[in-house]
Amino acid sequence: MRASANGSVPQPWKAQLERKLAQGAGLALSDCFVGLRAMFVLYFGISALLLASIPLDWLCGTSLAGISADWYIEIKLTVLAAALLWCVFFVAPAVACVSLLNAKPEKFLWRARPIVGALALNAMLFVGYQVWDHIPPRPPWPPEFIVPRTDIYGPRVAILKLEFMALRCMEDATPDDCRRPDIIRLQTRLFFELLDKVPGAADTFVGPRGWV
């Protein structure tokens, strides 16, 4: 009894716990391999489904091959990504536990739980990618610089240049630009504005009122 109290004799509950942990680690590793095999079947089953839809389209006149081809690459990449995540988060820890506990993998069994887990992981990744891909783009951020307003000085400068050219043509009408129709119209408008604004201009150019 004293030797058992000091721990020199192995305790039965400890050996039973180690045996249970080793058995659980072996079963977990076996389930992980079952999930990988399910992904392997899914990866090549998509190709078989695509090949089977070609003669079906030819016989029935459907377009299943076109639909399968549209989703073919995305499903393949999704299965590969799911298999990588399965190996990182499930297979690698299971292998480490089996190595630490010196356990042996259980006999290969096609259990439903790892198969459902592998298919659920593939479905989650595929749906998540489709949702992310169809999210509408965000509106653009407001610019950091001030957007310049419409240039109102350019047209004014052009009008002033034409008016200055029309005034010069009033003094000297020999240049060829003075015969342009827009210059002649500007000369006419400027002449009548001069008659309205300058006192006595009408008497100077036209003559006194009532003069014939």
Image: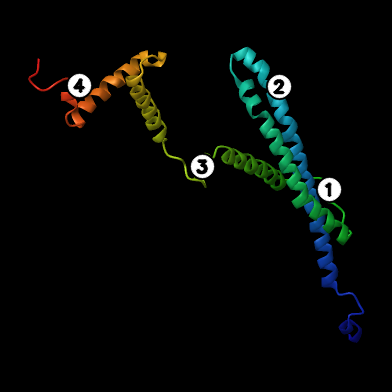
Which of discs 4 and 3 lies nearer the camera? The answer is: 4
Tag 3 residue: 140
Crowding around mark 1 (Cα neighbors within 10 Å: few <14, some 14 to 19, many 20+) is few
Q: Which mark is residue 107?
A: 1
**Element under disc 4:** helix
| Residue 110 appears in view | no
Q: Are marks 4 and 3 in contact (CB under 8 Å)?
A: no
Tag 2 residue: 51
- Give the spatial CA distance, label 4 vs label 3: 63 Å
- Give the spatial CA distance, label 1 vs label 2: 34 Å
Tag 4 residue: 205
Which of the image's four quarters has the N terminus?
A: bottom right
Crowding around mark 3 (Cα neighbors within 10 Å: few <14, some 14 to 19, many 20+) is few
Is 87 drawn above or below residue 22 in the view shown?
above
Seen at 81% across and 67% down, the residue is 17
Sequence-earlier tag: 4 or 3: 3
Is 48 drawn above or below residue 132 in the view shown?
above
Query: What amino acid is labelled 1 in the image?
Result: Lys
**Which scheme is used to colour this image of the protein?**
rainbow
211, 9: nearer the viewer: 211
